[in-house]
Image (tube, rainbow, N blue to C red):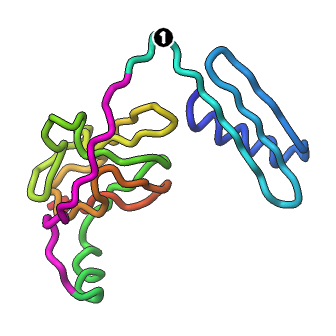
Amino acid sequence: MELKEIQNLIKFVAKSGASEVKLEMEDIKITIKTGLGKTETTIIQQPSLAQMPVATQPAISANVNQEEVQNSPQENAAADAKYVTIKSPIIGTLYRKPSPDKPLFVKVGDTIEVGDTVCIIEAMKLFNEVESEVSGKIIKVLVDDSSPVEFDQPLFLVDPS
């Protein structure tokens, strides 16, 4: 079951007025409980034998990311306005490398094309590649490796010129 299908199911249950819905499939169990304006969702996914982990979580580094230049907030806002922002399509954990022993997908100064993978976001034990929808040069990395990200959160700034 895809994340969008789960999100649509949650919206449907919230609109229907049902107080609780349980869905059980081969490898996933979903319970959605609603009440007094709030929705609670519990998702339990059983890993199947056919699924193999794509990447493991890298060790958290104590090094500070020095890829961006520090400016005042006013200077950042004015400069960032001319750039295109690559945003997170889903909620999850962002990884900038395909695995701990591999190089970064992209770093500041790299030139990317439409369709290039810029990072991976893990959601519910599934690793989703985030592809660029714009060609240009990576100007700023806005999220550290192994960081949790929200839906529509800015990840990278790209200079399309």
The magenta stretch is: 53-71
Residue drawn at point x = 47 percent, y = 32 percent: 125
Q: Position of residue 143 (x, y in %)?
A: 31, 60
In the image, taking residue 43 as reference, residue 60 lies left or right, namely left
In-front residue for pair 159/56 = 56
Report which quarter residue 104 is drawn in.
top left
Query: Which residue type carries mark 1?
Result: Leu
Residue drawn at point x = 43 percent, y = 55 percent: 149
Q: Position of residue 99 (x, y in %)?
A: 23, 34
In the image, taking residue 48 as reference, residue 131 lies left or right, namely left
Residue 58 part of the magenta-drawn span: yes
| Residue topped by disc 1 | 49
Above or below for 159 versus 133: below
In-front residue for pair 1/51 = 51
Q: Secondary structure at mark 1?
A: loop
Report which quarter residue 132 is drawn in.
top left
Residue drawn at point x = 72 percent, y = 37 percent: 9
